[in-house]
Amino acid sequence: MLAIFDKSDGFGNEDYACEKMVIKVDSKNQEIELSNLITGKKYAIALYHDVNCNQRLDKNILGMPLEKYGFSNDVRSTFGPPSFESAAFIYSQEKKTSITIK
């Protein structure tokens, strides 16, 4: 699941995403084209690998993710998702962004 956010409200909660995509992963390095975003606008991405296809990020009893996840700019935080600002980038069709999921 890949969720794209264009504001800080609800960042990390896919219900607040301006766009969501379920992508079938067929290689270790998957490329995804984001062509319907607005050039020059600020966005942040949150994604996770839904291993069991239940359409949610599974968590343990303490709320820690059990499935791999990542954010744009490869930012991480100790508790909860990172801030929108730390994950945000200015969209450009010419620029590639990579996200590592862990």
Image (tube, grey):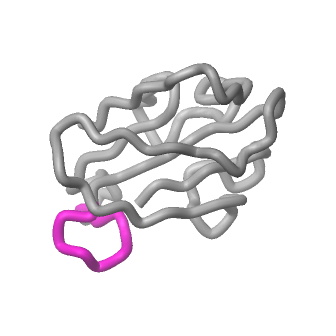
Report x, y in % for residue 80: 47, 44
Indicate yes or no whether the magenta region holds residue 73.
no
Q: Is residue 50 left or right of residue 34?
A: left
Q: Is residue 24 left or right of residue 71?
A: left
Number of disc labels:
0
Q: State which quadrant residue 16 falls in.
A: bottom right
Q: Is residue 96 left or right of residue 54?
A: right
Q: Is residue 98 left or right of residue 72?
A: left
Report x, y in % for residue 100: 31, 30
Between residues 55 and 95, which one lies in front from this camera angle? 95
Name the residue rendered at 41%, 66% in the picture.
22
Q: Would you say the magenta stretch is mainly helix, strand or loop?
A: loop
Report x, y in % for residue 97: 49, 25
Name the residue rendered at 76%, 45% in the picture.
6
Q: Quadrant of the C terminus?
A: top left
The magenta stretch spans which residues?
A: 50-60
Name the residue rendered at 30%, 57% in the picture.
62
Outermost residue, bottom side: 54
Q: State which quadrant residue 92 falls in.
A: top right
Whether 48 is drawn above or below 96: the answer is: below
Q: Quadrant of the N terminus?
A: bottom left
Name the residue rendered at 59%, 20% in the picture.
95
Whether 24 is drawn above or below 96: the answer is: below
Report x, y in % for residue 79: 44, 38
